[in-house]
Amino acid sequence: MSSFDTATTVYLGLGRSALARQIGELFCDAHGFRVLGSSAEAAILERDVLALERVPGIVLLSTDLLGRPLSELVELLVRRLRARVVVLGFPGAPPGSLDAALAAGAVHAEEVATTEIGLLDDRRAGRLFHLLRLFSEVRRPDSLELPAVRLSGAGRLLAAESGGRDVEPAASGQERGRRLDILSSAARSLRNSQLADYLMVGVVSSTGGLSALETVLSVLPHDYPFPVAITQHLRQGTDHEFVRLLRQHTQLSVELAVHGLRPRSGVVYVAPSTAHLRISSEGHLALTEEPKDSVFMPSATVLLSSMARVYGPRCVGVVLTGMGDDGAEGLLEIRKAGGRTLVQDKETSKIFGMPQAAIALRAAERVLPLAQIGEALCRLGQRS
């Protein structure tokens, strides 16, 4: 199955403002999304969506959409098409419009914070994409009365009643619990995005990596607020020695990653030489042999890609010295999701292969000398 087939489909009804145009352009380039159509007017949107063979994964509306009261359109899309509707409150939105959209059946409504020139920055755009992926997994409104979730301007989560929508067919207890878990995951993501800037740091390396990692970790304080996951290309049987050497150069606790463990702040988790380390959808450490055809075991891209999927804009990816191109595509996924990405520069890399590959893919937000990477991670921790 191609990535095109598995992409989240979305129809955009955002109006004609510069912000609407920017979001539309971002969606056209966004990894994991396929735009089925767009409209600035409610009547055209209604006609287009009704004519589609399949209901979009998300219908994304804004308070700037022209032509009819937004709550009426939301109610039509939810009741007639059983669509998942997400509403963005653009600057200058009428008071109460987001609450009305929620009462009409939207699964999520959120005020959009913009820059001084009235546009989204990369981090806010990445967060929006991450949330839409989560809400696209919520069961359609006809099958379960789910509480809609709104993120207010102050960052508080508010629950809105489902408005007594019919439930047909009735969900089993197990299925109902699964769907509620999905929505709870989305709600947790919203909360986390307000309570902490980042949830995990992932650092990957290969040739010359031990010395580089020792330099980076030596700067981080004992109360560093994030867990750190490391994938280093290791020869089998060298795992414990590698961990022992890292412990000598950091105030943080350093452990071999254990399957199913929930990461803790201030702890460094090292991928073993016999398995890939990834982050599960529940936010736990997971050890796996898949993909078995990977050139590297453990794989840097496997770790970074999983972080992008689970944490979206709330993670930091770092590519250090190493031969080959492992990690480049995973780092690009983090950047597209709105996370922060750091890459070691050529002058301080023992082998510039992995950093160079990441830079060539435009996955690097910043290219830094090795000595500055630990300092940059410290600043991110202090800010959070």
Image: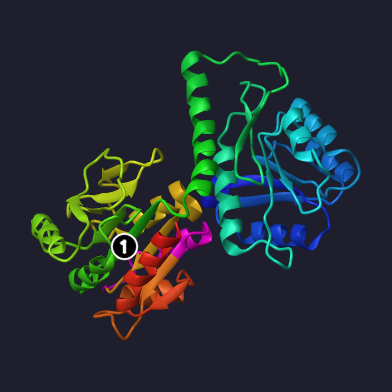
Count of labels in the image: 1
Q: In this view, does 252 lie above or below 97?
A: below
Q: What residue type is labelled 1?
A: Val
Residue located beneath label 1 in the image? 203
Q: Quick check: 225 above or below 356? A: above
Queried whether the magenta region covers residue 329, the answer comes back as: yes
Point out the stretch of residues depicted in magenta: 322-340
376 on left or right of 213:
right
- Asked if 38 appears above or below 148 in the picture, the reply is below
Q: Position of residue 138 (x, y in %)?
A: 57, 32
Q: What element carries label 1?
A: strand
Question: Does residue 291 appear anywhere in the picture?
Answer: no
For mark 1, does the 10 Å Cα neighbourhood hold few (<14), some (14 to 19), or many (20 or more) residues?
many
Provide residue 137's location: percent of width, then percent of height: 55, 36
Q: Percent x, y for residue 93?
A: 81, 48
Q: Which residue is drawn at 70% across and 63% down?
A: 119
